[in-house]
Amino acid sequence: MRTQATPDSNAAIVIGAGLGGLAAAMRLGAKGYAVTVLDKLDRPGGRGSSITQDGHRFDLGPTIITVPQVYEKLWAACGRDFHKDVDLRPMDPFYEVRWQDGSTFTARQDTDAMLAEVARLSPRDVKGYKKFLKDSERRYFVGFEGMVAKPMHRLWETLKVLPTFAMLRADQSILGLAKRRVKDPRLRMALSFHPLFIGGDPCHVTSMYALVAHLEKEYGVHYAMGGVQAIADAMANVIRSQGGQVRQGAEVDEILVENGAAAGVQLTNGQTLHAPLVVSNADAGHTYQRLMRNISRKRWTNAKLDKRRWSMGLFVWYFGTKGTAHLWPDIGHHTITNAPRYEGLLRDIFIKGKLADDMSLYIHRPSRTDPSVAPKGDDTFYVLSPVPHLGFDDPVDWDRECEVYKAKVQAEVDKHLPGFADHISTEMTLTPKDFQKRYLSPNGSGFSIEPRILQSAWFRPHNVSEEAKGLYLVGAGTHPGAGVPGVISSAEVLGKLVPQAPVMPEMKVAAE
Protein backbone atom coordinates (compact mmCIF):
# COMPACT_ATOMS: atom_id res chain seq x y z
CA MET A 1 0.00 0.00 0.00
CA ARG A 2 1.10 3.56 -0.63
CA THR A 3 -0.20 6.30 1.62
CA GLN A 4 -0.53 9.59 -0.27
CA ALA A 5 -0.46 12.69 1.90
CA THR A 6 -0.58 16.33 0.88
CA PRO A 7 1.93 18.79 2.43
CA ASP A 8 -0.75 20.10 4.79
CA SER A 9 -1.88 16.61 5.84
CA ASN A 10 -2.08 15.56 9.46
CA ALA A 11 -0.18 12.33 8.73
CA ALA A 12 2.97 11.77 10.79
CA ILE A 13 5.50 8.93 10.75
CA VAL A 14 7.70 8.03 13.71
CA ILE A 15 10.73 5.86 12.97
CA GLY A 16 11.47 3.57 15.91
CA ALA A 17 9.31 2.38 18.81
CA GLY A 18 11.90 3.08 21.46
CA LEU A 19 10.73 5.09 24.46
CA GLY A 20 11.56 8.36 22.72
CA GLY A 21 9.63 7.39 19.59
CA LEU A 22 6.62 6.18 21.57
CA ALA A 23 6.61 9.38 23.63
CA ALA A 24 6.86 11.41 20.42
CA ALA A 25 3.91 9.54 18.92
CA MET A 26 1.85 10.20 22.06
CA ARG A 27 2.67 13.91 21.90
CA LEU A 28 1.78 14.06 18.20
CA GLY A 29 -1.42 12.11 18.75
CA ALA A 30 -2.42 14.59 21.43
CA LYS A 31 -1.90 17.36 18.86
CA GLY A 32 -4.25 15.71 16.40
CA TYR A 33 -1.82 13.92 14.10
CA ALA A 34 -2.58 10.55 12.53
CA VAL A 35 0.58 8.77 13.64
CA THR A 36 2.19 5.61 12.32
CA VAL A 37 5.10 4.22 14.35
CA LEU A 38 7.44 1.89 12.46
CA ASP A 39 9.91 -0.42 14.20
CA LYS A 40 12.05 -3.36 13.11
CA LEU A 41 11.70 -5.33 16.37
CA ASP A 42 8.87 -7.68 17.32
CA ARG A 43 7.59 -5.58 20.21
CA PRO A 44 7.73 -1.93 21.32
CA GLY A 45 10.38 -0.49 23.61
CA GLY A 46 13.59 -0.42 21.58
CA ARG A 47 16.43 -0.70 24.06
CA GLY A 48 13.71 -0.90 26.71
CA SER A 49 12.12 -3.99 25.19
CA SER A 50 12.33 -7.50 26.61
CA ILE A 51 12.76 -11.12 25.59
CA THR A 52 11.00 -13.97 27.40
CA GLN A 53 12.90 -17.24 27.40
CA ASP A 54 12.07 -20.43 29.32
CA GLY A 55 9.74 -18.56 31.65
CA HIS A 56 12.21 -15.75 32.39
CA ARG A 57 11.58 -12.20 31.19
CA PHE A 58 14.82 -10.45 30.40
CA ASP A 59 14.44 -6.66 30.38
CA LEU A 60 17.13 -5.86 27.84
CA GLY A 61 17.99 -2.27 28.64
CA PRO A 62 17.05 0.36 31.22
CA THR A 63 15.95 -0.91 34.62
CA ILE A 64 15.99 2.20 36.82
CA ILE A 65 13.14 4.70 36.66
CA THR A 66 13.79 8.20 37.95
CA VAL A 67 11.78 11.44 37.69
CA PRO A 68 8.28 9.93 37.44
CA GLN A 69 7.07 13.44 36.67
CA VAL A 70 8.23 13.17 33.06
CA TYR A 71 5.85 10.25 32.53
CA GLU A 72 3.04 11.93 34.46
CA LYS A 73 3.37 15.03 32.24
CA LEU A 74 3.42 12.89 29.11
CA TRP A 75 0.30 10.98 30.07
CA ALA A 76 -1.43 14.20 31.20
CA ALA A 77 -0.75 15.75 27.79
CA CYS A 78 -2.78 12.84 26.37
CA GLY A 79 -5.59 13.32 28.92
CA ARG A 80 -4.64 10.21 30.88
CA ASP A 81 -3.26 9.17 34.27
CA PHE A 82 0.13 7.45 34.12
CA HIS A 83 -0.36 5.66 37.43
CA LYS A 84 -3.55 3.99 36.19
CA ASP A 85 -1.54 2.41 33.37
CA VAL A 86 1.77 1.63 35.09
CA ASP A 87 2.49 0.24 38.56
CA LEU A 88 5.58 2.12 39.75
CA ARG A 89 7.27 0.97 42.95
CA PRO A 90 9.76 3.10 44.93
CA MET A 91 13.05 1.37 45.72
CA ASP A 92 14.65 1.47 49.17
CA PRO A 93 17.56 1.19 49.14
CA PHE A 94 18.28 2.47 45.65
CA TYR A 95 21.36 0.31 45.10
CA GLU A 96 24.46 -1.02 46.84
CA VAL A 97 28.01 -0.30 45.67
CA ARG A 98 30.68 -2.90 46.51
CA TRP A 99 34.47 -2.76 46.46
CA GLN A 100 37.19 -5.37 46.31
CA ASP A 101 38.11 -4.88 49.98
CA GLY A 102 34.61 -5.89 51.09
CA SER A 103 33.43 -2.37 51.89
CA THR A 104 30.03 -1.22 50.68
CA PHE A 105 27.98 1.94 50.19
CA THR A 106 24.18 1.82 50.23
CA ALA A 107 22.39 4.66 48.45
CA ARG A 108 19.03 5.82 49.81
CA GLN A 109 16.71 8.78 49.37
CA ASP A 110 16.95 9.96 52.97
CA THR A 111 19.73 12.53 53.44
CA ASP A 112 20.47 11.52 57.04
CA ALA A 113 20.85 7.91 55.96
CA MET A 114 23.28 8.98 53.22
CA LEU A 115 25.28 11.08 55.67
CA ALA A 116 25.48 8.08 57.97
CA GLU A 117 26.79 5.95 55.08
CA VAL A 118 29.46 8.52 54.28
CA ALA A 119 30.43 8.76 57.97
CA ARG A 120 30.68 4.99 58.19
CA LEU A 121 32.86 4.73 55.09
CA SER A 122 35.00 7.84 55.50
CA PRO A 123 34.23 10.14 58.48
CA ARG A 124 36.60 12.86 57.26
CA ASP A 125 34.52 13.28 54.09
CA VAL A 126 31.15 14.16 55.66
CA LYS A 127 31.74 17.90 55.31
CA GLY A 128 32.83 17.52 51.68
CA TYR A 129 29.83 15.34 50.91
CA LYS A 130 27.50 18.05 52.21
CA LYS A 131 29.17 20.49 49.81
CA PHE A 132 28.71 17.97 47.00
CA LEU A 133 24.98 17.86 47.75
CA LYS A 134 24.82 21.64 47.38
CA ASP A 135 26.82 21.37 44.14
CA SER A 136 24.31 18.81 42.93
CA GLU A 137 21.27 20.91 43.78
CA ARG A 138 22.62 23.98 41.97
CA ARG A 139 23.43 21.94 38.89
CA TYR A 140 20.02 20.31 38.96
CA PHE A 141 18.17 23.62 38.74
CA VAL A 142 20.40 24.89 35.93
CA GLY A 143 20.98 21.70 33.96
CA PHE A 144 17.75 19.76 34.46
CA GLU A 145 14.98 22.21 35.29
CA GLY A 146 16.52 24.91 33.11
CA MET A 147 17.54 23.00 29.98
CA VAL A 148 16.30 19.42 29.64
CA ALA A 149 12.82 20.03 28.23
CA LYS A 150 13.69 23.22 26.30
CA PRO A 151 14.55 23.37 22.60
CA MET A 152 18.29 23.96 22.13
CA HIS A 153 18.56 24.14 18.34
CA ARG A 154 19.33 27.85 18.42
CA LEU A 155 22.90 28.69 19.44
CA TRP A 156 21.69 31.55 21.64
CA GLU A 157 19.91 29.10 23.95
CA THR A 158 23.27 27.53 24.76
CA LEU A 159 25.30 30.75 24.78
CA LYS A 160 23.07 32.42 27.36
CA VAL A 161 23.72 29.67 29.95
CA LEU A 162 27.50 29.72 29.48
CA PRO A 163 28.14 32.31 32.25
CA THR A 164 26.25 30.11 34.71
CA PHE A 165 28.09 27.04 33.43
CA ALA A 166 31.38 28.85 33.96
CA MET A 167 30.40 29.77 37.52
CA LEU A 168 29.50 26.13 38.21
CA ARG A 169 32.74 24.90 36.62
CA ALA A 170 30.94 22.87 33.97
CA ASP A 171 34.31 22.53 32.25
CA GLN A 172 35.40 20.30 35.11
CA SER A 173 34.55 16.60 34.96
CA ILE A 174 32.15 14.93 37.37
CA LEU A 175 35.09 12.91 38.73
CA GLY A 176 37.07 16.13 39.09
CA LEU A 177 34.27 17.64 41.17
CA ALA A 178 34.09 14.52 43.35
CA LYS A 179 37.86 14.74 43.90
CA ARG A 180 37.48 18.35 45.02
CA ARG A 181 34.88 17.41 47.61
CA VAL A 182 35.95 14.03 49.04
CA LYS A 183 39.25 12.25 49.60
CA ASP A 184 38.27 8.60 49.85
CA PRO A 185 38.66 6.97 46.39
CA ARG A 186 35.62 4.78 47.04
CA LEU A 187 33.42 7.81 47.66
CA ARG A 188 34.86 9.53 44.60
CA MET A 189 33.65 6.57 42.56
CA ALA A 190 30.23 6.45 44.29
CA LEU A 191 29.65 10.14 43.55
CA SER A 192 30.84 10.09 39.94
CA PHE A 193 29.84 6.81 38.26
CA HIS A 194 26.29 7.81 37.27
CA PRO A 195 27.20 9.09 33.76
CA LEU A 196 28.11 5.51 32.87
CA PHE A 197 24.36 4.79 32.86
CA ILE A 198 23.99 7.19 29.94
CA GLY A 199 27.24 6.29 28.18
CA GLY A 200 29.56 8.97 29.55
CA ASP A 201 33.14 8.73 30.81
CA PRO A 202 33.19 10.18 34.37
CA CYS A 203 36.74 11.40 33.69
CA HIS A 204 35.51 13.65 30.89
CA VAL A 205 31.77 14.36 31.08
CA THR A 206 30.83 17.68 32.60
CA SER A 207 30.36 18.12 36.34
CA MET A 208 26.78 19.19 35.53
CA TYR A 209 25.96 15.48 35.82
CA ALA A 210 26.39 15.83 39.57
CA LEU A 211 22.73 16.85 39.35
CA VAL A 212 21.85 13.13 39.46
CA ALA A 213 22.49 13.03 43.22
CA HIS A 214 19.86 15.72 43.80
CA LEU A 215 17.52 14.19 41.26
CA GLU A 216 17.63 10.86 43.12
CA LYS A 217 17.14 12.57 46.46
CA GLU A 218 14.24 14.68 45.18
CA TYR A 219 12.33 12.06 43.17
CA GLY A 220 13.65 8.70 44.32
CA VAL A 221 14.49 5.60 42.28
CA HIS A 222 11.65 3.39 41.06
CA TYR A 223 10.94 0.12 39.33
CA ALA A 224 8.00 -0.46 36.96
CA MET A 225 6.27 -3.75 37.68
CA GLY A 226 6.55 -5.73 34.47
CA GLY A 227 9.80 -3.91 33.72
CA VAL A 228 10.34 -1.01 31.35
CA GLN A 229 8.59 -3.22 28.80
CA ALA A 230 5.36 -2.55 30.74
CA ILE A 231 5.87 1.19 30.24
CA ALA A 232 6.52 0.70 26.51
CA ASP A 233 3.41 -1.48 26.16
CA ALA A 234 1.33 1.13 27.99
CA MET A 235 2.66 3.84 25.67
CA ALA A 236 1.76 1.78 22.61
CA ASN A 237 -1.75 1.33 24.02
CA VAL A 238 -2.16 5.10 24.42
CA ILE A 239 -1.06 5.62 20.80
CA ARG A 240 -3.62 3.10 19.57
CA SER A 241 -6.33 4.70 21.69
CA GLN A 242 -5.54 7.99 19.92
CA GLY A 243 -6.13 6.29 16.57
CA GLY A 244 -2.44 5.79 15.80
CA GLN A 245 -0.68 2.65 14.61
CA VAL A 246 2.36 0.85 16.00
CA ARG A 247 3.78 -1.46 13.34
CA GLN A 248 6.37 -3.99 14.45
CA GLY A 249 8.64 -5.82 12.01
CA ALA A 250 8.67 -2.75 9.77
CA GLU A 251 12.21 -1.43 9.22
CA VAL A 252 12.73 1.94 7.55
CA ASP A 253 15.40 1.96 4.86
CA GLU A 254 15.28 5.60 3.81
CA ILE A 255 13.72 8.94 4.69
CA LEU A 256 12.20 10.50 1.59
CA VAL A 257 12.88 14.17 0.94
CA GLU A 258 11.22 16.21 -1.82
CA ASN A 259 12.04 19.86 -2.52
CA GLY A 260 13.93 20.11 0.77
CA ALA A 261 11.07 18.76 2.87
CA ALA A 262 10.36 15.40 4.47
CA ALA A 263 7.91 13.44 2.35
CA GLY A 264 7.76 10.06 4.08
CA VAL A 265 9.79 6.87 4.27
CA GLN A 266 10.58 3.75 2.32
CA LEU A 267 10.75 0.43 4.15
CA THR A 268 13.28 -2.32 3.56
CA ASN A 269 10.50 -4.38 1.95
CA GLY A 270 10.01 -1.66 -0.67
CA GLN A 271 6.79 -0.22 0.76
CA THR A 272 6.51 3.56 0.69
CA LEU A 273 4.58 5.66 3.21
CA HIS A 274 4.09 9.38 2.62
CA ALA A 275 3.74 12.03 5.32
CA PRO A 276 4.89 15.65 5.59
CA LEU A 277 6.05 15.16 9.17
CA VAL A 278 8.69 12.53 10.01
CA VAL A 279 10.20 11.97 13.44
CA SER A 280 13.25 9.74 13.76
CA ASN A 281 13.84 7.91 17.02
CA ALA A 282 16.58 5.92 15.30
CA ASP A 283 20.09 6.78 16.47
CA ALA A 284 21.07 10.21 15.14
CA GLY A 285 24.10 8.69 13.43
CA HIS A 286 21.99 6.04 11.71
CA THR A 287 19.37 8.64 10.78
CA TYR A 288 21.84 10.81 8.93
CA GLN A 289 24.39 8.30 7.66
CA ARG A 290 22.00 5.57 6.58
CA LEU A 291 18.44 6.83 6.33
CA MET A 292 19.51 10.08 4.61
CA ARG A 293 22.39 8.59 2.63
CA ASN A 294 21.02 9.92 -0.67
CA ILE A 295 20.50 13.45 0.64
CA SER A 296 23.13 16.19 0.46
CA ARG A 297 23.44 17.24 4.11
CA LYS A 298 24.46 20.68 5.33
CA ARG A 299 25.52 19.99 8.90
CA TRP A 300 25.47 16.31 9.84
CA THR A 301 27.71 15.00 7.11
CA ASN A 302 29.40 11.61 7.38
CA ALA A 303 32.72 13.36 8.02
CA LYS A 304 31.30 15.33 10.94
CA LEU A 305 29.60 12.29 12.46
CA ASP A 306 32.82 10.29 12.14
CA LYS A 307 34.52 12.88 14.36
CA ARG A 308 31.99 12.49 17.18
CA ARG A 309 32.94 10.62 20.33
CA TRP A 310 30.54 7.74 20.87
CA SER A 311 29.42 6.21 24.13
CA MET A 312 30.92 2.93 25.28
CA GLY A 313 29.59 -0.47 24.33
CA LEU A 314 27.93 -2.94 26.66
CA PHE A 315 28.40 -6.62 27.35
CA VAL A 316 25.23 -7.93 28.97
CA TRP A 317 24.75 -11.47 30.23
CA TYR A 318 21.15 -12.45 30.95
CA PHE A 319 20.49 -15.64 32.87
CA GLY A 320 17.80 -17.40 34.87
CA THR A 321 18.62 -19.55 37.89
CA LYS A 322 16.60 -22.48 39.24
CA GLY A 323 15.42 -22.60 42.85
CA THR A 324 17.56 -19.69 44.03
CA ALA A 325 14.99 -17.20 45.37
CA HIS A 326 16.17 -17.97 48.93
CA LEU A 327 19.89 -17.77 48.09
CA TRP A 328 22.21 -14.75 48.27
CA PRO A 329 19.96 -12.67 50.57
CA ASP A 330 22.54 -9.87 50.60
CA ILE A 331 22.10 -9.27 46.85
CA GLY A 332 19.23 -6.89 46.28
CA HIS A 333 17.56 -5.49 43.20
CA HIS A 334 20.52 -3.30 42.11
CA THR A 335 24.17 -4.01 42.94
CA ILE A 336 27.28 -2.36 41.51
CA THR A 337 30.66 -4.07 41.90
CA ASN A 338 33.99 -2.34 41.39
CA ALA A 339 37.19 -3.41 39.72
CA PRO A 340 40.46 -2.71 41.56
CA ARG A 341 40.99 0.14 39.08
CA TYR A 342 38.54 2.95 38.43
CA GLU A 343 40.23 5.59 36.30
CA GLY A 344 42.49 3.05 34.60
CA LEU A 345 39.53 0.92 33.57
CA LEU A 346 37.71 4.01 32.26
CA ARG A 347 40.75 4.88 30.12
CA ASP A 348 40.81 1.35 28.71
CA ILE A 349 37.11 1.52 27.79
CA PHE A 350 36.78 5.09 26.50
CA ILE A 351 40.25 6.12 25.31
CA LYS A 352 42.28 3.02 24.44
CA GLY A 353 39.44 0.83 23.23
CA LYS A 354 40.95 -2.08 25.13
CA LEU A 355 38.97 -4.99 26.58
CA ALA A 356 40.49 -5.23 30.05
CA ASP A 357 40.72 -8.34 32.21
CA ASP A 358 39.25 -6.54 35.22
CA MET A 359 35.75 -5.10 35.17
CA SER A 360 33.09 -3.23 37.10
CA LEU A 361 29.64 -4.77 36.91
CA TYR A 362 26.01 -3.86 37.39
CA ILE A 363 24.04 -6.84 38.72
CA HIS A 364 20.29 -6.57 38.20
CA ARG A 365 18.06 -8.94 40.18
CA PRO A 366 14.48 -7.84 39.41
CA SER A 367 13.03 -11.03 40.90
CA ARG A 368 13.64 -9.49 44.33
CA THR A 369 10.83 -7.05 43.51
CA ASP A 370 8.81 -8.46 40.62
CA PRO A 371 7.65 -12.11 40.70
CA SER A 372 6.54 -11.92 37.06
CA VAL A 373 10.13 -12.04 35.76
CA ALA A 374 10.79 -15.68 36.71
CA PRO A 375 9.01 -18.95 37.56
CA LYS A 376 8.12 -19.30 41.24
CA GLY A 377 11.20 -19.93 43.37
CA ASP A 378 13.57 -18.96 40.56
CA ASP A 379 15.56 -15.81 39.80
CA THR A 380 16.17 -13.66 36.76
CA PHE A 381 19.42 -11.70 36.49
CA TYR A 382 21.29 -9.54 34.11
CA VAL A 383 24.91 -8.57 34.54
CA LEU A 384 26.21 -5.58 32.59
CA SER A 385 29.83 -4.66 31.94
CA PRO A 386 30.89 -1.44 30.15
CA VAL A 387 33.24 -2.29 27.28
CA PRO A 388 34.75 -0.39 24.31
CA HIS A 389 32.56 0.39 21.32
CA LEU A 390 33.44 -0.95 17.88
CA GLY A 391 34.74 2.30 16.42
CA PHE A 392 38.37 1.95 17.52
CA ASP A 393 41.13 1.10 15.02
CA ASP A 394 41.45 -2.43 16.39
CA PRO A 395 37.93 -3.25 17.67
CA VAL A 396 37.17 -6.18 19.91
CA ASP A 397 36.32 -9.31 17.92
CA TRP A 398 33.26 -10.43 19.84
CA ASP A 399 32.83 -13.60 17.80
CA ARG A 400 36.09 -14.70 19.34
CA GLU A 401 35.97 -12.95 22.70
CA CYS A 402 32.37 -13.39 23.85
CA GLU A 403 32.75 -16.75 25.64
CA VAL A 404 36.20 -15.84 26.96
CA TYR A 405 34.92 -12.59 28.43
CA LYS A 406 31.81 -14.24 29.81
CA ALA A 407 34.04 -16.65 31.75
CA LYS A 408 35.85 -13.67 33.29
CA VAL A 409 32.51 -12.07 34.18
CA GLN A 410 31.40 -15.36 35.73
CA ALA A 411 34.47 -15.44 37.97
CA GLU A 412 33.70 -11.93 39.19
CA VAL A 413 29.99 -12.55 39.71
CA ASP A 414 30.78 -15.73 41.67
CA LYS A 415 32.38 -13.56 44.36
CA HIS A 416 28.92 -12.14 45.06
CA LEU A 417 26.66 -15.04 44.02
CA PRO A 418 28.69 -18.09 45.10
CA GLY A 419 27.95 -21.12 42.97
CA PHE A 420 25.40 -19.30 40.80
CA ALA A 421 26.58 -20.93 37.57
CA ASP A 422 25.45 -24.35 38.85
CA HIS A 423 21.87 -23.05 38.99
CA ILE A 424 21.68 -21.43 35.54
CA SER A 425 18.71 -22.81 33.61
CA THR A 426 18.65 -20.42 30.64
CA GLU A 427 20.89 -17.62 29.35
CA MET A 428 21.69 -15.22 26.53
CA THR A 429 24.21 -12.43 25.89
CA LEU A 430 24.31 -9.14 24.02
CA THR A 431 27.60 -7.58 22.88
CA PRO A 432 28.30 -4.32 21.02
CA LYS A 433 28.04 -6.34 17.81
CA ASP A 434 24.46 -7.29 18.80
CA PHE A 435 23.65 -3.66 19.63
CA GLN A 436 24.85 -2.71 16.17
CA LYS A 437 22.59 -5.30 14.55
CA ARG A 438 19.52 -5.20 16.83
CA TYR A 439 19.34 -1.45 17.47
CA LEU A 440 21.19 -0.16 14.36
CA SER A 441 23.57 1.56 16.76
CA PRO A 442 26.67 3.18 15.18
CA ASN A 443 29.81 1.46 16.48
CA GLY A 444 27.59 -0.75 18.61
CA SER A 445 27.54 2.01 21.21
CA GLY A 446 25.09 1.60 24.06
CA PHE A 447 23.91 5.22 24.32
CA SER A 448 24.61 7.00 21.00
CA ILE A 449 26.87 10.10 21.08
CA GLU A 450 28.81 10.48 24.33
CA PRO A 451 27.43 13.31 26.52
CA ARG A 452 30.55 15.48 26.71
CA ILE A 453 30.03 19.21 27.11
CA LEU A 454 30.83 19.98 23.45
CA GLN A 455 28.48 17.20 22.38
CA SER A 456 25.53 18.48 24.39
CA ALA A 457 22.72 21.04 23.92
CA TRP A 458 23.32 23.02 20.68
CA PHE A 459 26.38 20.89 19.87
CA ARG A 460 24.26 17.72 19.73
CA PRO A 461 22.09 16.77 16.73
CA HIS A 462 19.05 19.01 17.06
CA ASN A 463 15.47 17.95 17.70
CA VAL A 464 14.47 19.89 14.58
CA SER A 465 16.66 18.83 11.69
CA GLU A 466 18.51 21.30 9.48
CA GLU A 467 18.55 18.77 6.66
CA ALA A 468 14.86 18.72 5.72
CA LYS A 469 11.79 20.74 6.64
CA GLY A 470 9.35 18.64 8.62
CA LEU A 471 12.03 16.25 9.94
CA TYR A 472 12.55 15.97 13.69
CA LEU A 473 14.73 13.84 15.98
CA VAL A 474 14.03 12.34 19.39
CA GLY A 475 15.87 9.81 21.54
CA ALA A 476 19.33 9.36 23.01
CA GLY A 477 21.29 10.89 20.13
CA THR A 478 19.59 14.28 20.24
CA HIS A 479 18.89 16.87 22.97
CA PRO A 480 18.75 16.38 25.92
CA GLY A 481 20.50 13.01 25.61
CA ALA A 482 20.44 9.42 26.80
CA GLY A 483 18.71 7.96 29.84
CA VAL A 484 15.00 7.31 30.13
CA PRO A 485 14.09 10.79 31.47
CA GLY A 486 16.18 12.28 28.66
CA VAL A 487 14.54 10.43 25.81
CA ILE A 488 11.05 11.04 27.23
CA SER A 489 11.95 14.73 27.56
CA SER A 490 13.14 14.85 23.94
CA ALA A 491 9.52 14.20 22.98
CA GLU A 492 8.41 17.06 25.23
CA VAL A 493 10.78 19.30 23.28
CA LEU A 494 9.24 17.96 20.07
CA GLY A 495 5.79 18.88 21.37
CA LYS A 496 6.96 22.48 21.71
CA LEU A 497 8.36 22.58 18.18
CA VAL A 498 5.54 20.94 16.21
CA PRO A 499 2.34 22.94 15.66
CA GLN A 500 -1.15 21.58 16.20
CA ALA A 501 -2.17 19.27 13.36
CA PRO A 502 -4.37 20.71 10.63
CA VAL A 503 -7.93 19.42 10.57
CA MET A 504 -8.04 17.23 7.47
CA PRO A 505 -10.38 14.73 5.85
CA GLU A 506 -9.32 11.08 5.81
CA MET A 507 -6.13 10.46 3.83
CA LYS A 508 -6.51 8.83 0.49
CA VAL A 509 -4.97 5.38 0.26
CA ALA A 510 -4.02 3.94 -3.09
CA ALA A 511 -2.30 0.73 -4.12
CA GLU A 512 1.45 1.07 -4.56
Image (tube, grey):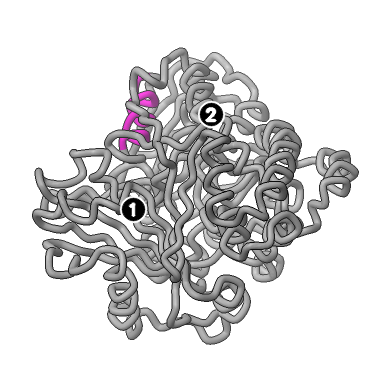
Of the two numbered discs 2 and 1 on the same chain, state the one appearing first in sequence: 2
Taking the spot 42% from the left edge, 52% from the top edge, the residue there is: 96
Is residue 462 visible from the viewing direction of this image? Answer: no
Pointer 2 local density, CA inside 10 Å: few below 14, some 14–19, many at least 20: some
Q: Measuring from the top left, give residue 396's x and y in whole percent.
A: 45, 82
Question: Would you place residue 128 above or below residue 71 in this image?
Answer: below
Question: Would you place residue 505 above or below residue 288 in this image?
Answer: above
Q: Nearer the viewer, residue 290 or 344?
A: 344
Q: Amino acid at mark 1?
A: His
Disc 1 is placed on an element classified as strand
Residue 216 is inside the magenta segment: no
Taking the spot 40% from the left edge, 59% from the top edge, the residue there is: 362
Question: Would you place residue 107 above or below residue 9 in this image?
Answer: below
Taking the spot 17% from the left edge, 55% from the top edge, the residue there is: 327
Q: Which segment did they paint magenta?
A: 230-241
Q: Amino acid at mark 2?
A: Val
Disc 2 is placed on an element classified as helix
Residue 233 is inside the magenta segment: yes
**Numbered badge on residue 364:** 1
Please say if the residues under marks 2 and 1 sit with CB atoms less than 8 Å apart. no
Q: Which residue is mark 2?
A: 70
